[in-house]
Image: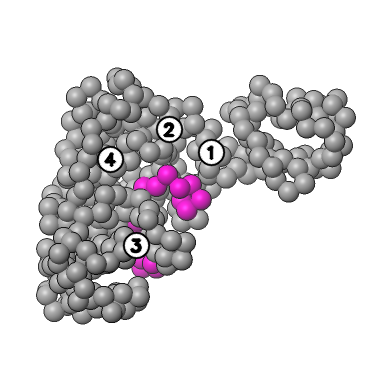
């Protein structure tokens, strides 16, 4: 990929005997919305902290816009950490101006931009309130404003929708798409597959510290299309279980079945007919991202290589904005 905003080359990170990220290769094209997906504890946040220089890789290297990250990170990257970190006793507008200035924005320009953003996100009347007087969701919107105030070329968003109600999730999604239309590269990590499916052009799925899948979302769906069967039927349903069935769910007048990777759906149809079910529809469908996730990561959730389980993972403190690289 010649025009990548971000590259990771065989990046590995250990915490004692715990391997958090294992030889991860990653390329994020400029101008794309790229999802870093995985179960909680899979290594997403550790990967992002290495991208941001908060942690250093034990092996491998990180490139931003084809250069050393230390030269480009502060001016070109906006970072919203998973563990929100704001100075709670600062006033909201004062805090945003501070965040803008440490990213190279002139104080007056930062104040003007911050005021516009606060109005847009329904916080105009809170500009002179202390951060600690805001709700959790309001604080998250303030931190998001601080993330975009310097108009970054790359947005790195770690679990950006956590703590927001559905209305504000929609607002944030629209802003993300707006930045995408302007040509901004967006990398966000999430374990919420439905949001990733709506937003992402490319995804990387990691589980237990290792990359499992990586590529354009539509291509991944085509490659996985032989594993989802939608069946509308009447009659008995005991035939639904079987060695080729990974999971099933009720869908309208029938059932949607996710098969084991590479499984042939024909025995399922034969069992249904033999059991006396009347089949009205039997159709192989394109899988949802959630189903791809379950197929490839569901059996991998647990202890990472070289560990005794998730409990071995060290706790990581909140990242405060003044401490960012």
Relative horizontal placement of residue 279, taking residue 12 as reference (left or right): right
Q: Position of residue 72 (x, y in %)?
A: 16, 55
| Range of magenta residues | 175-197
Instruction: Say whether residue 124 is magenta.
Output: no
Sequence-earlier tag: 2 or 3: 3
The disc placed on residue 212 is 2
Q: Position of residue 273 (x, y in %)?
A: 85, 29
Of tags 4 and 3, which is closer to the observer? 3
Of tags 3 and 1, which is closer to the observer? 3
Sequence-earlier tag: 2 or 1: 2
User: Considering only vertical position in the picture, is 235 above or below 28?
Assistant: above
Residue at the spot of label 3: 137
Task: Give how far apart the Cα atoms at labels 2 and 1 are.
Answer: 11 Å
Asked whether residue 67 appears in the rendered view, the answer is: no
For numbered disc 3, what is the local secondary structure? Answer: helix
Residue displayed at 22% across by 40% down: 316
In the rendered image, the quadrant that contains the N terminus is: top left
The disc placed on residue 292 is 1
Sequence-earlier tag: 3 or 1: 3
Residue at the spot of label 4: 47
């Amino acid at each position: 990929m010649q025009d990548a905003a971000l590259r990771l080359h065989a990046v590995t990170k250990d915490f004692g005997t715990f391997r958090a990220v294992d030889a991860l290769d990653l390329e994020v094209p400029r101008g794309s919305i790229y999802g870093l997906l995985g179960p909680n504890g899979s290594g997403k946040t550790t990967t992002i902290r290495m991208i941001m220089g908060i942690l250093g890789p034990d092996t491998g290297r990180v490139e931003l816009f084809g250069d050393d990250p230390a030269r480009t990170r502060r001016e070109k990257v906006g970072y919203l950490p998973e563990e929100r970190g704001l100075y709670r006793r600062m006033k909201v507008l004062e805090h945003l101006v501070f965040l803008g200035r440490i990213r190279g924005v002139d104080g007056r320009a930062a104040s003007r931009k911050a005021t516009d953003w606060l109005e847009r996100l329904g916080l105009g009347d809170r500009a002179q309130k202390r951060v600690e007087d805001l709700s959790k969701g309001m604080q998250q919107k303030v931190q998001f404003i601080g993330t975009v105030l310097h108009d970054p070329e790359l947005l790195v968003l770690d679990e950006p929708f956590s703590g927001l109600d559905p209305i504000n999730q929609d607002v944030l999604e629209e802003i993300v798409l707006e930045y995408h239309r302007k040509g901004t590269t967006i990398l966000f990590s999430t374990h919420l597959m439905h949001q990733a499916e709506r937003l992402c052009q490319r995804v990387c799925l990691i589980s237990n510290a290792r990359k499992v899948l990586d590529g354009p979302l539509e291509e991944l769906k085509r490659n996985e299309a032989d594993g989802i069967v939608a069946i509308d039927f009447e009659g008995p349903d005991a035939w639904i279980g079987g060695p080729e069935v990974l999971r099933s769910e009720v869908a309208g007048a029938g059932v949607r079945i996710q098969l084991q990777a590479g499984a042939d759906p024909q025995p399922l149809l034969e069992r249904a007919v033999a059991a006396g079910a009347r089949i009205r529809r039997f159709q192989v469908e394109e899988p949802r991202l959630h189903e791809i996730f379950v197929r490839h990561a569901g059996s991998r959730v647990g202890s990472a290589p070289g560990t005794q389980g998730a409990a071995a993972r060290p706790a990581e403190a909140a990242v405060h904005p003044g401490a960012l690289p």
